[in-house]
Amino acid sequence: MDAAASPEITILLKAWGLGESSALDRLIPLVYRELKRMARRHMRRSDSGTIQTTALVHEAYLRLVDLSSAGWQHRAHFYAVSARIMRGILVDAARARGAQKRGGMLQRAGAYTDFDLGQVPDLGEGRAAEMLAINDALDRLAKLDPRQVQVVEMRFFGGLSVEETSEVLKVSPQTVMRDWKLAKVWLRREMRKSTTN
């Protein structure tokens, strides 16, 4: 992320939140490249049935525009919310993909023994089920530790650094790393369990 643009992005986010519509026009070119990078992280491989990078960015943008009064704190907060929105879009796409196949039944994608929080699953053949399994596991984790879910959303879906995640959550980088490690272990275990049930 462009640290040089950070103060300008924060100023524009706050102005937009206060109702200055021209701030949004100046903000979009500054954040578009980063939103595209975040989306590309999700769309590693192309598949004709998979949502495309540009479509993901544009859908996220449309949802973000409705959040002008979100009380934006800074650039990292904006990207954290963007990550959460992208997670929702990808889960919706995975559900729609499953509904189109086999009369709405998603085929289990096999054992998630290779589950890796370093790479967001492609929604291509057989991977939509994995995306839904990740989402379900995150929903279960949210009942136990909501902050760990926020860390996963920001790091996994949003590509935020430890420091940026720390800034958004107002906790130390060490706390972010501890939550990240614990969440990865918990999610890996849950993903393995989901294939045996």
Image (tube, grey):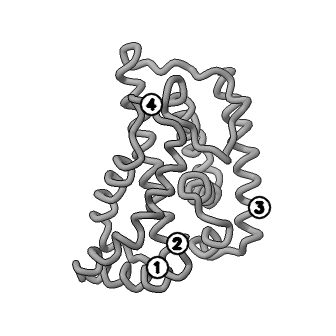
Q: CA distance from mark 4 to mark 1?
A: 37 Å
Point out which mark residue 47 bears. Answer: 4
Earlier residue among tags 4 and 2: 4
Q: CA distance from mark 3 to mark 2?
A: 20 Å
Residue 182: percent from left, percent from top: 75, 52
Point out which mark residue 76 bears. Answer: 2
The quarter in which the N terminus is drawn is: bottom right
Residue 112: percent from left, percent from top: 68, 29
Badge 1 is on which residue?
73
Q: CA distance from mark 1 to mark 2?
A: 8 Å
Identify the residue shown where x is 34% and y is 70%: 28
Identify the residue shown where x is 48% and y is 80%: 5
The reply to whether callout 1 and callout 2 are in contact (CB within 8 Å) is: yes
Earlier residue among tags 4 and 3: 4
Earlier residue among tags 4 and 1: 4
Q: Quadrant of residue 98?
A: top left
Kind of residue at badge 2: Ala
Kind of residue at badge 3: Arg
Badge 3 is on which residue?
178
